[in-house]
Amino acid sequence: MNWELIISGAAFVVSLGVAIYSYLQGRKSNDLQEEQTKLQRRVVEIEEQREQERLAKENRADLQPYFRYISRKDSPVKIARQITIENLGKHEAQNIRMYVDGDPVSMHRDIFCRPDNKLSPIQPDSDQMWCIEVDEESPEVCEIMLKWDDETGSDYEFKDKLPLKK
């Protein structure tokens, strides 16, 4: 027997095994790198989408309602006498609709003096006021929802519960 030939054959088999192992490990590493690259791309897409949404929100109309209250001489309770809707955004708010406790404001003529649901357009840094009639029988709190459109889109919404009495 030729020991040199046996040793050479064994070395060849070991080398081949190491080469196959290295190839498989390299392939596994490449697969992991590809997966990581895909995840990084997705994270960048999400960040870009959030930035676009933030910029869009900054540039649109932004309506905020609030009540003005007065005190009555005969009662310690302050009651709302006026609702002001302010546009804090950068675009004119159009097609403004107001809902009270889920219903159009026209269903609440006992509180809101205007007979319809639509408001006039509100320019940026401007407001619009409505008189309201609140008495002891009115609810303590009402949910106000505003919907509007502007140049950047439609059906934007503000929704919050506001106290009619303090």
Image: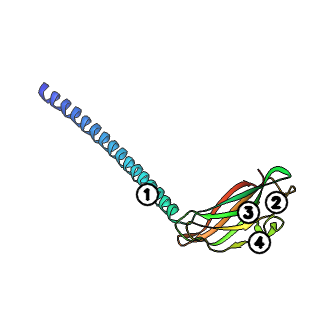
Label 1 vs label 4, nearer the camera:
4
Residue 4 in sight in this render: yes
Q: Residues within 10 Å of mark 4 (few under 14, many from 20)?
A: some
**Disc 2 marks which residue?**
134
Q: Are marks 1 and 3 in contact (CB under 8 Å)?
A: no
Q: Earlier in the sequence, mark 2 or mark 3?
A: 3
Residue type at numbered disc 4: Arg
Residue 95 position (above or below residue 34) = below
Residue 150 point in image, percent of width and height = 57, 71
Q: Secondary structure at mark 2?
A: loop
Q: Are marks 1 and 2 in contact (CB under 8 Å)?
A: no
Q: Are marks 4 and 2 in contact (CB under 8 Å)?
A: no
Residue 13 point in image, percent of width and height = 23, 34
- How many angstroms separate mark 1 from mark 3 (CA)? 41 Å
**Disc 1 marks which residue?**
48
> Which residue occupies 84% across, 66% down?
110
Label 1 vs label 2, nearer the camera:
2
Residue type at numbered disc 2: Val
Label 1 vs label 3, nearer the camera:
3
**Disc 4 marks which residue?**
114
**Disc 3 marks which residue?**
82
Residue 2 in sight in this render: no
Residue 117 point in image, percent of width and height = 73, 72
- How many angstroms separate mark 2 from mark 3 (CA)? 10 Å
Residue type at numbered disc 3: Gln
Location of residue 145 (image quadrant): bottom right
Q: Secondary structure at mark 4?
A: loop
